[in-house]
Amino acid sequence: MKKGFIVLLVVLAVAGTVFAQGSQEAYPTKPIDLVLASSPGSGGDVTSRLIAKHLGQELGVTVNIINTPGGSGIPAVQSVLTAPADGYTLMSEQGLSSSYQMALDEIPYDIFKDRKYICKIASGPQVLCGSPNMGWNDIRDVAAFIKANPGKEFFWGGIGISSAANFAVIQFMNSCGVDITKTKEVRYDGGGKILAAIAGGHIMIGSCAASGVPPFVQDGSVKPLVVSGSSRLATLPDVPCAAELGLTELTADFWIGISGSKNIPDSVVKTIEAAAEKISKDPAFIADLAKVGVVVNFVGSADMPAALEKEGTAVRKMVKGN
């Protein structure tokens, strides 16, 4: 009797182990939500939806984008941190909701200790745009306009101090010797809203991730004035890059990846990371990104913390001077 009982315990233990392994291997079995700290139509939104499409095809489940803009990315992050840590509510990550927050004075969580960064997938430049009615040919004309009209109010669109959109404007004004304190930021909750505000005549200039700009250019409602960095975009071939205009400080870009709360299982990290790395090598995915001026820029979970620390330190130094 005792021997039989022991055998039964062994069988149950083995069965439990197999069941547990099977449960871990089952992920994902239902749709995954990727929370994004940007508004619909923004560059981050356009890129995130392309990633969601291809990632969902690879994982065999629907991947949804949940737009949660505003608040310097903090509300979006908090919604992920307070959700069940089961891998079904993750973050469509970007600098706005991670490394750039190192420039903020206070946030209700620890950027590194409370979060788990799975990977970076894609990146692209910022594009500074203005109204086509102003007659500006490139961003240098904007600087000349501001300097020639010292008593005229100059409004530009921003998303917040912890955004690539703001950094692009700051870098432009620093490079051209414009005193940004003589201008006024109007706050929006995404690059798409900034472009819409330019089109509506509410602000003079603003910056958006490259992937969000083409629709506004095609309908003639905004004028792209410069692409950050050292290369022109195939999607905007007539727009000069910052380097060729001598604006070497204008390097702000945006990137999209995936993260979760610190308590998500390692098995989830491995599954998502492997799927993301696989699609990053898929010619169809690469081609889809290229259509919106974005490139693959894969960085795995092992290297993400150091990359974010380096980026965040540079951002904080630019904004705070320390």
Image (tube, helix red, strand yellow):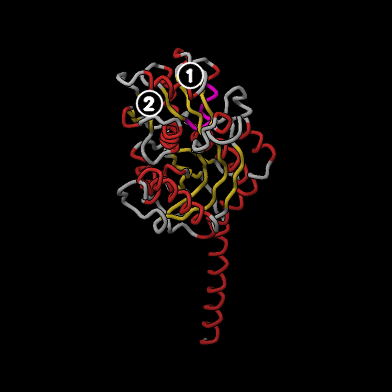
Looking at this view, is 229 or 14 the one in front?
Answer: 229
Question: Which one is earlier in the sequence, the residue at label 1 or at label 2?
Answer: 2
Which residue is depicted at the point 54% across and 32% down? 246
The type of residue carrying mark 2 is: Trp
Residue 250, placed above or below residue 279? above
Mark drawn on residue 127 = none
Q: Report the side of 138 relative to 69 (left or right).
A: right
* Secondary element at image label 2: strand
**215 is within the stretch colored magenta:** yes
**309 is within the stretch colored magenta:** no
Q: Position of residue 263 (x, y in %)?
A: 43, 59
Crowding at dot 1, Cα within 10 Å, few <14 / some 14-19 / many 20+, comes out as many
Q: Position of residue 113 (x, y in %)?
A: 40, 59
User: Which quarter of the picture shows residue 147?
Assistant: top left
The type of residue carrying mark 1 is: Val
Q: Report the side of 271 relative to 84 (left or right).
A: right
Residue 142, placed above or below residue 163? above
Tell me the magenta residue range.
Answer: 208-216
Which residue is depicted at the point 43% across and 37% down? 167
Q: Position of residue 47 (x, y in %)?
A: 54, 35
* Secondary element at image label 1: loop
Looking at this view, is 319 or 85 the one in front?
Answer: 319
Q: What's the magenta bit mostly, secondary-structure-wise?
A: helix
Which residue is depicted at the point 45% across and 44% down? 95
Mark drawn on residue 222 = 1
Q: Position of residue 179 (x, y in %)?
A: 35, 31
The residue identified by callout 2 is 156
